Image (spheres, grey):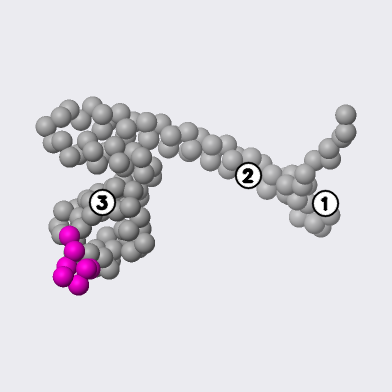
Amino acid sequence: MKIGELASATATKVETVRYYEKIGLLPPPARTSANYRAYGNDHLARLSFIRRARDLGFTLEAVRELLTLSDDKAQSCDAVDGIARVHLTEIDRKIADLSALRGELDRVIGSCRHGTVADCKIIETLAPRTLTAT
């Protein structure tokens, strides 16, 4: 299949496919006599794996590690589990940060008196505090 077909089959932009090739996540494809890239089912499976991992929020470096690990089917999956657990911890941290952010924004919105912008607590909260010279 051509690069556009591969991109379409995996909901990936053509430029992204080329980038993944450039950084070594996708192996270089064979070339046709007209010098077009010719992708096979292995490319489709690998790109689908990359896309799914990225959709789950794994970094490109984690994806690279997962791909390397997936290439050796006989080894223990402890390393894969470790990568996933580190990612889960990061997700939990982000959720906690977002929850705190939500609470603060809810508090600020709750302080709104529905007056004029000049008296708006939201604007007041967002405005820079007066800095005093020392």
Q: Is residue 127 above or below residue 36?
A: above
Residue 48 is at least partly visible in this image: no
| Crowding near the residue tagged with mark 1, few <14, some 14–19, many ≥20 C-alpha atoms within 10 Å | few
Q: Is residue 124 above or below residue 18?
A: above
Residue most extreme to the left: 74
Q: Which badge, 3 or 1, is on the more N-terminal residue?
A: 3
Q: CA distance from mark 2 to mark 1?
A: 18 Å
In front of the other: label 3 or label 2?
3
Q: Contact, CB < 8 Å: mark 3 with mark 2?
A: no
Query: Residue 18, percent across and down?
Result: 32, 58
**Of the pair 110 and 67, the residue shown nearer to us:** 67
Q: Please give the residue where the numbered disc 2 appears in the rendered image.
A: 106
Query: Residue 58, percent across and down?
Result: 36, 42
**Of the pair 69 and 11, the residue shown nearer to us:** 69
Say what secondary structure mark 2 lies in.
helix
In front of the other: label 3 or label 1?
3
Q: Which badge, 3 or 2, is on the more N-terminal residue?
A: 3
Magenta region, residue range: 30-36
* Left or right: 98 as drawn, with respect to 43: right
Q: Amino acid at mark 2?
A: Asp
Q: Is residue 34 magenta?
A: yes
Query: Residue 122, percent across and down?
Result: 73, 49
**Of the pair 91 and 113, the residue shown nearer to us:** 91
Prevailing secondary structure class for the magenta stretch in the rendered image:
loop
**Of the pair 74 and 3, the residue shown nearer to us:** 3
Query: Residue 100, percent across and down?
Result: 57, 37
Q: Quadrant for the C terminus, please.
A: top right
Q: CA distance from mark 3 to mark 1?
A: 56 Å
Q: Please give the residue where the numbered disc 1 appears in the rendered image.
A: 119
Say what secondary structure mark 1 lies in.
helix
Q: Please give the residue where the numbered disc 3 appears in the rendered image.
A: 26
